[in-house]
Amino acid sequence: MAMPILKQIAGHGSCARLQRYLEKNGRALARDLFNFDGVPEPDHDVEPDPIGRFDWAGTMDRVRKEEGNDLPWKGKEARTFKHFVLSPSPADGMDLRSLRELSQAWVRRFFPDYHVAIVYHDDNEGRIPHAHIVVNNTNVVTGRRMHTDDPLELNRTLQEMAAKRGLDALSNERPKPRTGFQRLSSNGTGAPARPRTLQETYRGRAERRAEETGGYSWVADIRSRVSVAKNLARSEREFRRILGMMGVDMEDNSPHARRQDWVFSLSDAPARRVSGERLGASYGKAALERRLVGARVEHLTDASSRELLRLARKAVELKDLGELDSLSRALETCSRWGIASVDGIDRTIAAQRRRLGNGVPATRERAILESLEALGRARAFLTKSKALPLHDASRKVARGNGKGGWKSDPTTPSQSTPTQERELDARGGRQR
């Protein structure tokens, strides 16, 4: 079956040569730019402006150099940018507007805080438009170097996005066996069932009603505890351990269930149990395993991580579910933006306001306003609780051993003698 193809090319050195190639001799059909000061965010419903003399490559090179992200990393030449080529299926007959919509949606999904230039060509056999997507290696909000936990997810998501738009796509699931021999050889491992929901966080009717009336929802309680654990843990072992410290048990669901998942329950009320995907797509076993394999939480210092864990355990002990909910939402916000300090929140807020000032499509304005609201709530909570430092630690310290993440297990003190571990546990997870 024909399908959209996503080709990835690692870039080294300056972007200038690539810009000259993409835009020389008027070959480009159109160009979309993201996160450049003074440049409105593109809208596929609006005719693109004529391609002018804007040095997007120079801006990428300058920002990368200012942040030190053009230097070798672990003895290897720096990967300074990524160049993706998105080629739609010829069978789809995709026009430039549809290609711009798909390309922009994909960029916003994976690279919302990077300098991105999309240049559209049709210089192939059949004059089929395709997109060259150039992504700088530096996050414009945090200054950190680009890291992709699961590179295969980039293409997986593109195929899903294409399918939702009625385009040809390569299925991410195995085809169903047709013959008796195929069914026998598949050994019952056919295509997996689809997840219950695609919403990252899903709230059912009873939970929404409890939230509106100020009542207690044990489902929301479990979700908040799981949220804290998944945003503090860097491995499945740490995830399980943090859950246990906050009174949540975790086990596999039935092997006969339609999808493999984890089931979470309250340790002091084991009958109150809920599967991960009922909490939302980001809480299911598949999503959590992808997150925890090679997970990095280097945006948080050891001290911040332990203080946040202490606050979460205290909220659970006091049954202060409002505090626990505020903490889990603040952690989700910090994780999304890679925030390590109050200054980091302020920089992120300023970047989002600049984006609004540059001009954005109406469909994006609401999302940015919601982000600003979440950032404001996170700032208020984390400033009041003093869980984050005012300023970022040096990048060298934050990286610890050079692999990202904490230098030590977040659930134990750095000097882990048995006596100190008992004292830490007695104080709720914080060393004095």
Image: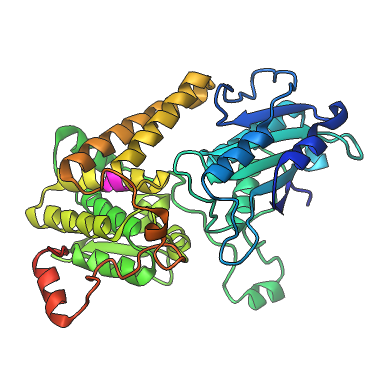
Q: Please report the residue visible at 16 percent of the width from the left and 40 percent of the height from the top.
A: 384
Q: Please report the residue visible at 14 percent of the width from the left and 75 percent of the height from the top.
A: 420
Q: Quadrant of the C terminus?
A: bottom left
Tell me which corner region of the image, top left, top right, bottom left or bottom right, holds residue 163: top right
Report the front residue among 214 and 236. Answer: 236
**Whole-percent x, y for residue 4 in the image:** 73, 46
Q: Please report the residue visible at 73 percent of the width from the left and 33 percent of the height from the top.
A: 119
Q: In this view, does 29 lie to the left or right of 332?
A: right
Tell me which corner region of the image, top left, top right, bottom left or bottom right, holds residue 127: top right
**Whole-percent x, y for residue 419 in the image:** 12, 80
Is 329 part of what is drawn in magenta?
yes
Q: Residue furthest right?
A: 125
From what the image shows, is residue 210 above or below residue 367? below
**Whole-percent x, y for residue 355 in the image:** 49, 26
Q: Look at the image and tell me whether residue 233 can be seen.
A: yes
Tell me which corner region of the image, top left, top right, bottom left or bottom right, holds residue 23: top right
Report the front residue among 258 and 30. Answer: 30
Q: Which residue lies furthest to the bottom in this view?
A: 418
**Whole-percent x, y for residue 389 in the image:** 25, 47
Is 34 part of what is drawn in magenta?
no
Examine the residues drawn in magenta and state their main secondary structure.
Answer: helix
From what the image shows, is residue 340 above or below residue 40? below
Q: Which colour scheme is used?
A: rainbow
Report the front residue among 106 and 301. Answer: 301
The residue range painted magenta reads 328-332
Q: Please report the residue visible at 51 percent of the width from the left and 24 percent of the height from the top.
A: 363
Q: Look at the image and tell me whether residue 110 can be seen.
A: no
Q: How many marks?
A: 0
